[in-house]
Image: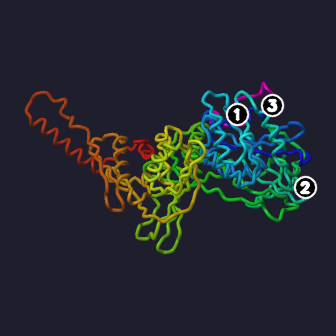
Amino acid sequence: MDQSKIRNFCIIAHIDHGKSTLADRLLELTGTVEKRAMKNQLLDQMDLERERGITIKLQPVRMSYKDHELNLIDTPGHVDFSYEVSRSLAACESAILVVDATQGIQAQTLSNIYLALSANLKIIPVLNKIDLAAADTQKTSKEIVGLLGCDEKDILLVSAKTGEGVEVVLDKIISETPPPNGEADKPLRALVFDSYYDDYRGVILYVRVMDGQIAKNSQIKMMATTAEGIALEVGSLKPDMNSAASLQSGEIGYIVTSLKSAHEARVGDTVSLVSKPAQEPLAGYKEIRPFVYAGFFPISNEDYQDLKEAVEKLSLSDSSLQFTTENSQVLGFGLRIGFLGLLHLDIVRERLEREYNLELIITNPSTDYEVILTSGENLDLKNAAELPDVSNVMEIKEPWIKGEIVVPKNYVGAILQLVAGKRGHQKNVSYMEGDLAVVDFEAPLANLLTDFYDQLKSITSGYGSFNYELADYRAEDLVRLDFYVAGEIINMLSIIVHRSEAETLGRRTVEKLKDVIPRQQFKVSLQAAIGGKFIAREDISAYRKDVTTGLYGGDVTRKKKQLAKQKKGKERLKKFGKVDIPPEAFTVMLRRD
């Protein structure tokens, strides 16, 4: 199609502001999907997405409207997938900004606007859910005007649920979105904004053709990973695959390749042709680096091979998933898996349990650390148990994040206290139109991993929203905190913490372990230690002396003899007895007090 008739756009929003519902109405109005085939959240393919009401994997779709070709990319709304969002924005010329009229501007709204502005996109503001009784269109419109600097009349009022005002959005996309400006006679350069592995067809790429064109059966080359393959099929998504002879400059579509792993075709890579390669790849490619790690162990060691195969299959279609084998004295063989964030971890866990019928034990999530040894060698540490002897360590660096919290003004004081309690530093507090404040801060990522988001929602009565990005790695006074059960160190419970927090965390954790580990026939000591120094202790008392319950009458010496015999047995058990540690003990850090 003529480039002047093509419009490429995406929808950006905070979680649950109606992004997927608006996409449903656009598909309905343009006749892309027949009424009888329509269902809610049509572009959300996974059951998990439908159940949770969030978009996890982005999805492109092509629509035809008033002689124009409209290419929509439905993007994820969660902070964990911000790199996918940035690549999707790079494939578009405009973005529909959806804001919930009942909730107003929130943290991910701001984050996505900054991404859209940095990609030089035309932003079309849309105020959604105007049909609800709680909608405050005047107040939310002022917030949008204050944020974008647009006129109030430029904000489109819609109800994605009822379809009210959605047709105006389509007209606005055609009139406001600039057409693509690619050069058809140049060598092929296509941006990969998503890729996944299909069991039957291999790796499938979702691409935006920037320059040139690609035909079926072309020999292709990935410019970042240098992998080569064949374009077995090309075409567009409506939303099902619709094959074509070629993809032209300015178009968005898919390429079915002969590649065997999504690691060979990562998000952000540039596709070119082997016969006529491009000289320069498209800008902005970066390796996605996970910074949340957790140990995954099967309930039974017999299932270890099944777990490994399942994770390998998932990693074929998720290039950000990284894993290594791990061995624990208590849990046996397992895998240490790296994730983009806690939501990513939760999704992978649930997919492994549902799709592969695995019962899993998951250890407390931690982040990675940069360790500089006295020899000058640098280590990337993903597991606290692997920290070398402190005499060989010069310094330990931990990741810090730049965070942004959006809350109503009257909660600012409580938020500042929360940030300070996590070793964070408040950088700035700014006030937006209406009732909202934006708190910018920096904090160590490790302190935000467990219950920060829950605490934020709790102290702001659910109104607070949070967004972050990795800032840098900083050297701090960090120590390894070990935990002992009955005198035996449990490596899977070891964590790296700041020295000032070690004692409090040690005491709190052994108290939680005391609730989780069952009583034995002998007294069990639970201890927290830094190096050789114990800093906290709790004891699980033994079962009471119950060997005399069957004795009736007779001399008291009979009882004494039995009790003395039991005492000897308990002393022996204390030396040789093993404590059976339940799976819940490995997630005590995640338990709320």
Amino acid at the residue labelled 1 = Thr
Q: Which residue is mark 3?
A: 29
Q: Which residue is mark 2?
A: 184
What residue is rendered at 23% in x and 37% in y?
544
What residue is rendered at 33% in x and 43% in y?
514
Q: Which is more foreground, mark 1 or mark 2? A: 1
**x%, y% of residue 227?**
76, 59
Q: Quarter holding the C terminus? A: top left
**x%, y% of residue 232?**
84, 48
**x%, y% of residue 358?**
55, 39
Who comes first in sequence, dot 1 or dot 2?
Answer: 1
Q: Which residues are magenta?
A: 31-50
Q: Which residue is mark 1?
A: 21
What residue is rendered at 71% in x and 55% in y?
118
* Mark 3 burial class by Cα count in 10 Å: few <14, some 14-19, many 20+: some
Q: Which is more foreground, mark 2 or mark 3? A: 3
